[in-house]
Amino acid sequence: MGHQMIELGLAFKNGFLPLDRQIFIGDKKAHLLNNAFKDSISAAAQDFKCALEKDKNEMFRSMLQRTIRKGFMAKYCLADSWFCSKKNIRTVIDNNLTGILRTKRSKLNYLFNGKLYTLVELYFLLRRRFRKNSQCKWKTFSAVVKIDLSEDIKIHDYIQVKLVFSAPKDQKKDQWAAFLSTDINLSNEDVLKV
């Protein structure tokens, strides 16, 4: 009822180790406290305050930086489409990680051959590039594009990223996904494998 758990963990070949988690309280149907905390500076009170005041992306960035400060290191930072935002991509790069994030079909623009396109526009422009690979159950294609990480419309901060599009070999109409990799040299298969 309006409560969710955000979890950050270390994934490796033989399992998953949870490192940090935070409750998130949404705007819809949330049941809040009947009474205020007796001790407003207790850990529980502070966590509750964070759950109310921060959004999921702020939590993601805090959790990632807190985990790295504690000495946990990884090669990649993986996240679903909810966390594919400019600030999150910048945080991943600033922490010397390779980001692989599932992308949203949003209004976010990507610069390709001198023109700006949304993800859906790029998909329809380039989908003839889909290729089947016998070593993978997916067909894929990719494009190296630029994304502006600046939040200021007067200043641009373009970086190169690789968009890897994938779909089942027996794809139905709208059955495709795209992943953003901050390492443009990773192969399509390696991006999907990771």
Image (cartoon, helix red, strand yellow):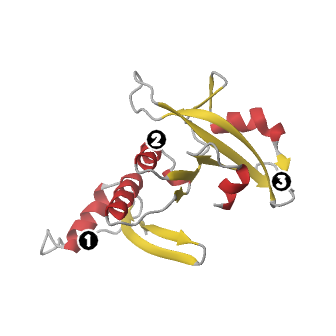
- Residue indicated by mark 3: 171
Mark 3 crowd level (few <14, some 14–19, many ≥20, 10 Å Cα): few
The type of residue carrying mark 3 is Gln
Q: Nearer the viewer, residue 81 or 159?
A: 159
Q: Nearer the viewer, mark 2 or mark 1?
A: 2
Mark 1 crowd level (few <14, some 14–19, many ≥20, 10 Å Cα): few
Q: Residue at x 63, y 41 (%)?
A: 162
Q: Nearer the viewer, residue 36 or 7?
A: 7
Q: Nearer the viewer, residue 66 or 123?
A: 66
Q: Earlier in the sequence, mark 3 or mark 1?
A: 1
Residue 186 makes an appearance in the image: yes
Look at the numbered discs 2 and 3 and tell me whether their residues touch, using CB distance below 8 Å: no
Q: Earlier in the sequence, mark 2 or mark 3?
A: 2
Tell me the distance, in whole angstroms, between the alpha carbons under discs 2 and 1.
34 Å
SS at badge 1: loop
The type of residue carrying mark 1 is Leu
- Residue indicated by mark 1: 33
Q: Quadrant of residue 113?
A: top right
Q: Position of residue 60 (x, y in %)?
A: 40, 57
Q: Nearer the viewer, mark 2 or mark 3?
A: 2
Image position of 40 (left or right of 112): left
Image quadrant in which the C terminus is located: bottom right
The type of residue carrying mark 2 is Lys
- Residue indicated by mark 2: 86
Q: Position of residue 89 (x, y in %)?
A: 47, 45
